[in-house]
DNA sequence: CATTTCATTGAGTCGCAACTCAATGAAATT
DNA sequence: AATTTCATTGAGTTGCGACTCAATGAAATG
């Protein structure tokens, strides 16, 4: 029984989160809430009518990104498949995900926890996928960290690797290939 | 002919940089210059008498860290030696170096350039060291990025890997061992 | 139709951080 | 000894960002 008011409210909230994700994908996390309000064509006060603090808005954004990460990697059937899926989702949220990992200290503790929890789950999915392949005698945890490190390294330095456009679109396949060679 | 005044001035400057490095190793880069002044037991104005802007102070700090990185890795004679040296220097500046890579967007462009240039030089040293060993047929650049990614991954997530104390002191050897196995 | 609810507004408050500058006094110069 | 230089000081200025709240008017309710 969503009446017109409730509908309007939830739409506004969704719009704010959506626009905030675009804004923070392009500008750093200390960008003002006023800038978000302007981009979303709502008043500054509206932001705070929906999110008590800026931190709460950030948390909502982090959740929005982490959910697909977890579900996509869960569906993976093999290691190559996992790597593909992982890159695919990250590519979709590339710019914003990059902010999250590179400006972790600007995130509230609660958001960090969400990020860490998601990463842990992805690690579990990695190891499940890994079990289908035979690899070197290296602890699976270290293999995951190597993979994650490699991907994040390209993300963090995307300005050098791909000054314009998506690093992962450009180097995703290379990264997958390199990792598969390393562990075989 | 360093005057007493000139001596005093350069000492003050050195002290400010030194203390700033300690402060920013512990707190994020948006920590106020006033906090640095207090920690260094100088007035707030003194900071700006030596550094026109906060950015200039940050640049001085980045240079202070990058110099030993470049010189230490230059001296490396073999790949294992390189990895050792690299970890050794990073361990010394661990907390601060972590800030630099994790809060790059808080750094002025000039500081970023210094960081990027240093990294490029270290990469060259890596490849020189790599030439002494025979490894898989993977582009040397990708191998370096894998190594760098692995190390930075541990640094960025040091809170999880080593909540108290140095991650590299604890995992440096593991990282070296893992990397050497991967490429052999 | 009258009354109440409530999402939205935007001007205003509060606090903090970078940066300024006239004043101070000790060292350098004459 | 008198005068000048200059490193240092810290109270003050400026700007900006998060957050508040009384007002508004359209939708819900009776």
Image: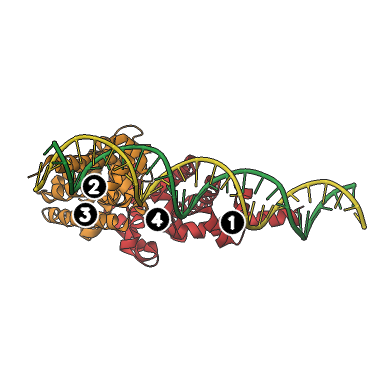
Chain colours: A orange, B red, C green, D yellow
Question: Which image quarter: residue B154?
Answer: bottom left
Which of the chains bears the disc numbered 1? B
Q: Is residue D7 above or below residue C11?
A: below
Q: Circles 1 and 3: CB distance less than 8 Å?
A: no
Label 4: which residue? B83
Q: Against B91, is A170 above or below?
A: above
Image height check: is A33 above or below A112? Answer: above
Q: Position of residue A53 (x, y in %)?
A: 32, 51
Q: Give the CA distance from mark 1 to mark 4.
A: 32 Å
- The spot of residue A16 in percent (x, y) is 25, 41
Residue placed under numbered mark 3 in the picture = A118
Disc with the residue nearer the chain's start (1 vs 4): 1
Give the residue drawn at x 49%, y 49%. Answer: B70
Q: Are there few (<14), some (14-19), or many (20+) residues within 10 Å of tag 4? A: many
Q: Nearer the viewer, residue A178 or D24?
A: D24
Chain identity of mark 3: A
User: Are the two marked residues, 4 and 2, in contact with CB atoms closer than 8 angstroms?
Assistant: no
Closer to viewer: mark 1 or mark 4: 1
For label 2, the residue is A179
Rounded to the nearest angstrom, the CA distance separating label 1 from label 3 is 40 Å
Which residue in the protein does label 1 denote?
A: B16
């Amino acid at each position: 029984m969503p009446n017109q008011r409730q509908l309007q409210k939830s739409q506004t909230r969704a719009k704010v989160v959506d626009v905030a994700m675009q804004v923070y994908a392009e500008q750093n996390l200390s960008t003002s809430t006023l800038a978000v309000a302007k981009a979303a064509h709502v008043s500054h006060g509206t932001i705070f009518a929906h999110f008590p603090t800026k931190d709460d808005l950030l948390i909502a954004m982090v959740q929005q990104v982490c959910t697909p990460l977890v579900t996509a990697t869960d569906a993976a059937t093999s290691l190559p498949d996992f790597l593909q899926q992982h890159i695919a989702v990250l590519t979709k949220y590339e710019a914003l995900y990059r902010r999250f990992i590179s400006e972790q200290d600007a995130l509230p503790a609660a958001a960090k926890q969400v990020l860490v929890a998601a990463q842990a789950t992805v690690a579990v999915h990695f190891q499940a996928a890994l079990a289908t392949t035979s690899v070197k005698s290296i602890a699976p945890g270290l293999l995951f960290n190597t993979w994650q490190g490699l991907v994040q390294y390209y993300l963090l330095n995307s300005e050098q690797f791909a000054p314009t456009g998506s690093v992962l679109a450009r180097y995703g396949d290379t990264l997958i290939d390199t990792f598969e060679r390393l562990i075989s």
